[in-house]
Image (tube, coloured by chain):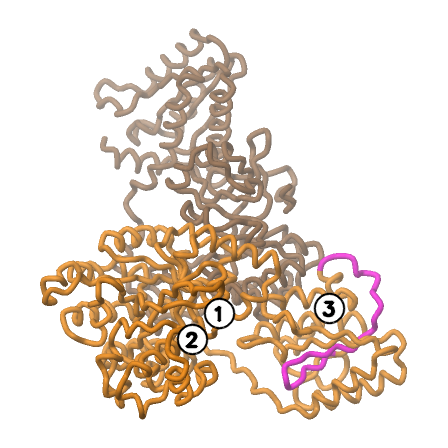
Amino acid sequence: MTSAAMVQAAKRREPEGPDADKARQDVARLVTLVNDCMKAGIPREACLVRLSALPEERVKPLHLRLARSALEPITQADRAQLFQLPNGDMAAIWRGPAEAAANASRTTIEHMFTDDKAPAPTARLWEAFTLPADGDRLLAALNALAHPRKESPPAEPSPNALAQLDAQALTAIETALARADVSHFARRRDICMRMPDASFRRRWEKRYLSVEDITQSLAPGHATRLEPWLFRRLTRTLDRRMLALLAANGELRDAGPFAINLNVASVLAPEFLRLDESLPATLRGHVIIDLSPADVMADPSAFVFARDFAHSRGYRLQLRNITAELLPVFDLHRLGVDIMELHWSDAVASIGPEVILPNASSVVLSHANTPDAIIWGLAHGVTLYRGEMAIPERSRTGRTGQSLILH
Amino acid sequence: MSGASLLGVAPLSGRGELGATGAERQLQEAALRQSRNPAGRLAIALHLSRLVAPAPRPHHMRIARACLQDTATRHDGQVFGLANGDLVLLCRSGATADATIGRHAAADPQALPEVLNRLFRVDTPPSVTLVSVWPLETRSGELLAYAASCLAQAPMPSFVAPDGANQASTMDAIGTVITAAEVTDILQRQTGVLLSSGAKRGEMGQLRPIYREVTFSIAALEARIVPLCRVNDDPFLFRHLAARLDQRMLEVLSAQLASQSPLDMATQSAPETGALLHVNLTVSGILSSGFATLAALCRRAPQTGGGRHAARLGVEVNLMEAVADPRGFARARIAVAEAGFTLLLDGVSHLALSLSKPAAFQPDLMKLDWSPRIADLAPHEASIIDHTIAEFGPHRMILQRAETEAAMRWGMSRGIRRFQGRHVDAMLGASRIVACRQAEACTLRQCIERSAATGTAGRAGCTNLRLLDEASPPKVPASAPPRSTRADALRSAGRAEEILS
């Protein structure tokens, strides 16, 4: 089986909906646990059962249930925990020697999934780890779970095949957007705080319009992001529509704390004043205005005016999309904003733990889609995350427990 | 706030906001009426007309109206939008019970003046009183006098919001012009100088031209089309246009480097002056094949130019470009360095300098935009600017838009020695007039304008083109010309600052 086929097989097995959330939470919990063991030198035993390495026809739901039951002996060990990973793999971690139980589980698994007629899986089906010594190897394996997506073939047409946006096309999209019902394009994302028990709790949600869906619907065949300055200009129209949507009757009646992307000019536009007028009293002080660095620098005078106006009305300001290169350029206090959204990337990952992240408690680590993002964040004092690794645990009462208090 | 006021529609009566027409008369009537029973009444005047251009901008008017209207709604008040841009609120002076948090607290008439002063502090000159507060019990006379004086003022032209379709059409039209026009007719030049210290502290020494910046003249471009809006109304559309200008600029530079054109003159500098040709490019332009071609041509210039020194360029990149694509900027910085050129960070205002740390982009030089506001900043803001300049190195800073001697003195007092702007143009022009034997019929303004032009039409009238085009005009110390000669030159042309203002 080729690696691409393995990736596809693994992707087909990825659970969706609540199961997917549960699996991502499991990864985050496991990563935190391994990290804690490594930091504190706590001895633990662990195993990774790589069901994703098997051919598709060898892993049916029935097999997965059988695999889970095969791991039963090991779950009887001291402090044992079982984790279901997003790609179908399973992991267990326990304290102390439990050789007999581990051997029993391993034998059953291998017996169940090894077929003499089929080629052997490219990765070992059962992999054992002794913590803290093997911590890095286990973390690397967990990180790899999050990366196969990069290897999958693009589902959408390549940007090169799409027409580049020009000024006339931009005008056409803006005109169409002014008439379109944009409520279909409204999306939400959670920004979560990592709790001491390694779970994530929603602090606020980001409300935005899906540019990809809007482009596909209103300007099919155009790649809006290929012309970055025209795209930024388009975001002003998106702002106006988003603001109008939020100010519509009843839209914010039961809303919790939320953030919206806005341009500086939009904060000073009539549409924003309308939203401000209709904002429920319970939400005042719980709305974050998310600004882009280029927009701030495009008109610093207007930014300072908008910042002071927004603060006087109880809004909080966030500077989004801060990359590793922009980190030394912007300082929260100097800029007078409240939160900074740091975009996780390889360049950010290369910032070592010896570098102190200023105002870490006011930093949101975005695109935290891999365990190493969370590990990096924890090492630098970051508590707020957005991404696949930061899925809030739903409380019994549903979407509760939201608060914008950061400190 | 009512929906009507948001849309700028004046309600006919009641507590709503009044339109500009007749507002002065209505203010006077209301002031007279309320001053007869002034107990607990207050007038707050927001003097937007006292702000320095480009303020008050449309968003200033909009937000100020919203703030005043909020107070009017909660405190039995009325807002008057006057023709000169000022806004006046007449309301009850006491705080309401809900004046505890956020926007209610900001709407308190007692707190409102501070809120307004804070909002507008960036655009308010220090000597200006932006907000007047007149309790009617004690100061109704001042309100009445103010209302009477406003009645006598001429109305301000109303602002027409730029239209998106018009902006896009204008950009497209300009894009067509730059590819079709004779390029020297739409380019302009400006010289940057190094100013040595004078013998005494604060005294200006000798001017030495160190570079000549070549840019597309937006005024010349707009003159060739029927602009439906100002080109730089929208910074994003303007950056988009800049990318198209780049391609044309790179073509032009590559084509003209081997010729004896006005553009090329700047690159064939004498070694002792080391003058450069400065061009503005975008990050994508620097990373394009056009830039690589230009870099290769510049490296070959000594062979093709008959013994001239290698052409050297200064590449200016706008701060917005660097912030929008920091990774691309880092690659562009390497490309510029590999080509042997100098990288400058352009478009750095004093506000940008106090809000961010542009030096972290590691340019070779940084161009700080002069504004009269810089000299009047609050102490903590001024110290941020001073500290940033000292940390980056004043010898690596260029003060551009240096329109007055005050600008140059401000820069010199901080160790800055590189300047560009209309005051520098005037000083260089005066030097040329002093040195030129054919200058009898020329004024200083004509000499400056001809020097800025790169096309034949723009330079018509000058009979000493060699002197006009020289990157290094004759060395004339700023204070060196014999008093009589320099005075004659300036007398014939009028004082530099006066004619340029």
Residue ID for mark 2: B423
Quarter of the image that includes the N terminus of chain B: bottom right
- Does mark 2 fall on the same chain as mark 1? yes
Which chain is indicated by disc 2? B
Measured Cα–Cα span from mark 2 to mark 3 = 38 Å
Vertical arrangement, residue B461 with respect to residue B128, above or below: below
The question of residue A250 being in magenta is answered with: no
Query: Is residue A232 among the parts visible in the rendering?
Result: no
Amino acid beneath label 2: His
Measured Cα–Cα span from mark 1 to mark 3 = 32 Å
Q: Nearer the viewer, residue A250 or B254?
A: B254
Amino acid beneath label 1: Ala
Q: Position of residue A393 (x, y in %)?
A: 57, 37
Residue ID for mark 1: B407
What residue span does the magenta drawing correspond to?
A: B79-102
Residue ID for mark 3: B113
Name the side, left or right, on which B113 lies relative to A167.
right
